[in-house]
Image (tube, rainbow, N blue to C red):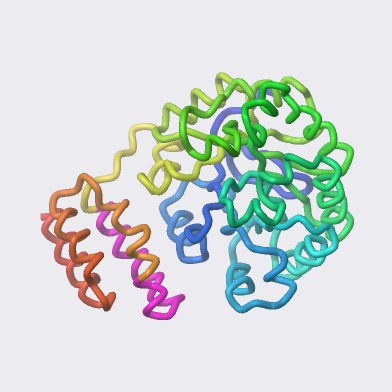
Amino acid sequence: MISCFPNDPFRIGQVEIPNRLVMAPLHEITDQPFRRMIRGVGGVGLVVSEMISSEALIRHARKAERMMAGSGEHPFSMQLSGANPEVLAEGARLCAASGADLVDLNMGCPASNVTKGGAGSALLRDIRLAEACVRAMVKAVAVPVTVKMRAGWDHRQKDRTEFLDFLRMFEDAGVRALAIHPRTRSQQYEGEADWSLIARAVEAGRGYPIIGNGDVRIPEDAFRMHRETGCAAVMIGRGALANPYLFREIVEPGFVATDAMRVGLTLDYLRLLMDLLEPREALHKIKKIGGMFTKGIPGGVKFRQNLHLCQDPEPLLRQLEALKETLAA
């Protein structure tokens, strides 16, 4: 059966995803307020938590446990980082117990503070350890276990197409879906994502869906990735930060968000932050993300200037309300 991208549902194990668009896990960004906001905009089929340290989670660190918050979010995946199979297994159990529909293993994060401990993309240097981690997680939980990976640690590993060995291992170990970001760890976020590697993964014909990720910035990019690679779904990260209406624009051709809508969304997001987080943390989050939402909007420069100087979110609320009214007039 030929899928109708992006609106047809697909399955990851026993979990049905209502369409073929996935919000990528983004560290310190895809927390509960952000996920609620992006779901409210519409168009996204699956959201993923920000990366949660399995070591911190099993120590019941307050920050790690808060990252699991996802009441009423379905379908919802929680992503774990780590390199200790037993710890990852216990972390997966905690995620499943807290309501995760899926549990994901991060094998793509290129940050040195993650890879120096053997986690993230560092697992690409040790397929036996990676297999032990995956098998431990699969054995620990009844919910589907998925993986997000890069094309390799460096260009030499990529050129040897060692990622295909990982694909076979994942299938044998019981992985139920794989998201591929086709850059190497050494590339970080430089250069272009090599979509041909996503196509090769699809052609390998493993028994789980392949989700493509990387360099999807406008609606046509999503359609082109699906068309050129045959991937089951498209995962979008930074593109949705630049344009949080991107998912909706993909599923609703012709839809264009107005400047007033974008400011209104920024306002709604700030209110969500203030409802769900402490004021200091809410201010930190809006400073990190809110400026991206207002780029190119009349009055956006002044808002961003105030944003970085502000020590209290209340004045920002008033400024956004006034800016929204001006743009809607």
In percent of the image, x 19 and y 66: which residue is there?
306
In percent of the image, x 53 and y 35: which residue is there?
187
Q: Is residue 87 magenta?
A: no
In percent of the image, x 21 and y 44: which residue is there?
296
Q: Which is nearer the eye, 204 or 268? A: 204
Say above or below: 181 vs 304: above
Image spot of residue 177 (x, y percent): 73, 41
Q: Is residue 279 magenta?
A: yes
Q: Quadrant of the C terminus?
A: bottom left
Q: Quadrant of the N terminus?
A: top right
Image spot of residue 60 (x, y percent): 69, 78
Horizontally, is 280 left or right of 5 in the view? left
In percent of the image, x 73 and y 40: which residue is there?
124
Q: How many marks?
A: 0
Horizontally, is 167 left or right of 300 in the view? right
Horizontally, is 277 left or right of 153 in the view? left
Highlighted magenta segment, given as a residue range:
261-283
Q: Which is nearer the eye, 143 or 28? A: 28
Image spot of residue 288 (x, y percent): 37, 60
Q: Quarter of the image holding residue 139?
A: bottom right
The secondary structure making up most of the magenta span is helix
